[in-house]
Image (spheres, rainbow, N blue to C red):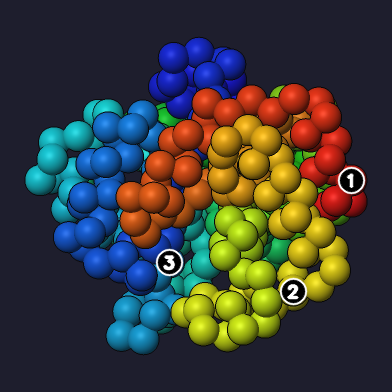
């Protein structure tokens, strides 16, 4: 996927995607408005969310992130300045889930209403639906593209085999095709993407928008002991990284960051930007410092020695 397809200056412009999963969760509406304004000012114009964000929070039912973004569009008038990505398919309650055509038609209207827009730049299948044929799903997406409600479609959480099948189905049936994949990929989680998905990505030349790009915050260097994780609100998500390999990766990040006058978070994102196939890592921000790390990561170009150091530590 050429980056210019999603509205940027050209195919070689480094991109970071602002994650909207925190809106309505750890970031309330007023603060989200401020961060979205600041993100645009910093050149971060790609925003990713999903209909299900943030249903996991007590009292939420899903749609909170999209609703906040929609209110910000209405207040700021900046819809045209944003590359907007959202997703469909994860359980929303009341039987609302999956990738059957009828549900996709319903879900996109719900998302458009919450987002207060008449089009979505990138509409993604949040996860594969093995109970629905790829042809049915892709035919539904194709209709949305033809109606102008969606500009492009993408996939998230697909296996390499199913992704290739989906891309071949689009080609053979003349349907809109996935132009991007959103996989779990970072310095701590390399195997699944590099062995199963990257060959498909490279064969079909689609873009990659990585999620959990900072491994739940572990790659920022904020978790350096069990105690750090225990006192953090999201510490449970990084427990599996609190081991020799994880601390070795953090040490390598520290070393590269120190040499470059940077931060571990920026280096971890710059490593992703240097990886084959990766178009735009997703990073969430709950404050100005984190937002600055996202913006500055696009300007950090790692040398071969630094990349090799990080590759070796995370192998």
Left or right: 185 with respect to 18?
Answer: right
Q: Relative to 282, does residue 173 appear above or below in the rendering?
A: above
Q: How far apart are the alpha carbons under marks 2 and 3?
A: 29 Å
**Of residues 125 and 38, which is closer to you in this image?**
38
Circle on res. 312: 1
At horizontal 89% and vertical 45% (from top left) the residue drawn is 312
The image position of residue 145, as x and y in percent, is: 43, 33
**Of residues 218 and 108, which is closer to you in this image?**
218
Q: Is residue 272 visible?
A: no
At horizontal 22% and vertical 59% (from top left) the residue drawn is 31
**Of residues 305 and 196, which is closer to you in this image?**
305
Circle on res. 242: 2
Left or right: 246 with respect to 17?
Answer: right
Q: Relative to 195, does residue 126 appear above or below in the rendering?
A: below
**Total of numbered circles in the picture?**
3
Picture quarter containing residue 18? top left
Q: Earlier in the sequence, mark 1 or mark 3?
A: 3
Picture quarter containing residue 223? bottom right
Image quarter of the N terminus: top right
**Of residues 288 and 272, which is closer to you in this image?**
288
The image position of residue 198, as x and y in percent, is: 81, 39
Where is mark 3, residue-wise?
Answer: 52
At horizontal 57% and vertical 65% (from top left) the residue drawn is 222
């Amino acid at each position: 996927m050429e980056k210019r397809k999603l509205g940027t200056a050209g195919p070689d412009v480094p991109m970071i995607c602002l994650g909207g999963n925190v809106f309505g969760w750890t970031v309330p509406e007023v603060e989200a408005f401020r961060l979205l304004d600041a993100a645009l000012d910093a050149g971060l114009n790609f925003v990713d969310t999903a209909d299900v964000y943030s249903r996991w929070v007590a009292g939420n039912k899903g749609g909170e992130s999209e609703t906040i973004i929609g209110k910000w569009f209405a207040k700021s008038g900046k819809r045209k300045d944003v590359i907007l990505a959202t997703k469909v398919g994860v359980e929303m309650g009341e039987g609302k889930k999956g990738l059957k055509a009828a549900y996709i038609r319903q879900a996109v209207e719900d998302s458009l209403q919450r987002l207060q827009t008449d089009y979505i730049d990138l509409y993604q299948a949040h996860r594969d639906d093995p109970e629905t044929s790829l042809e049915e799903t892709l035919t539904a997406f194709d209709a949305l593209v033809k109606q102008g409600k969606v500009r492009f479609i993408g996939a998230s959480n697909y296996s390499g085999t199913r992704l290739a099948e989906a891309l071949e189905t689009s080609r053979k049936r003349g349907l809109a095709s996935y132009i991007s994949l959103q996989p779990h990929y970072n310095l701590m989680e390399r195997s699944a993407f590099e062995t199963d998905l990257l060959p498909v990505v490279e064969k079909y030349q689609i873009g990659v928008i990585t999620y959990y790009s900072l491994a739940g915050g572990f790659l920022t260097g904020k978790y350096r002991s069990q105690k750090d994780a225990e006192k953090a609100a999201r510490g449970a998500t990084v427990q599996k990284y609190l081991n020799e390999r994880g601390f070795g990766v953090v040490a390598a990040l520290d070393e590269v960051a120190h040499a470059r006058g940077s931060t571990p978070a920026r280096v971890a994102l710059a490593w992703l930007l240097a990886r084959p196939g990766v178009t735009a890592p997703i990073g969430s921000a709950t404050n100005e410092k984190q937002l600055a790390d996202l913006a500055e990561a696009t300007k950090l170009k790692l040398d071969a020695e630094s990349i090799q150091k990080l590759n070796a530590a995370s192998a």
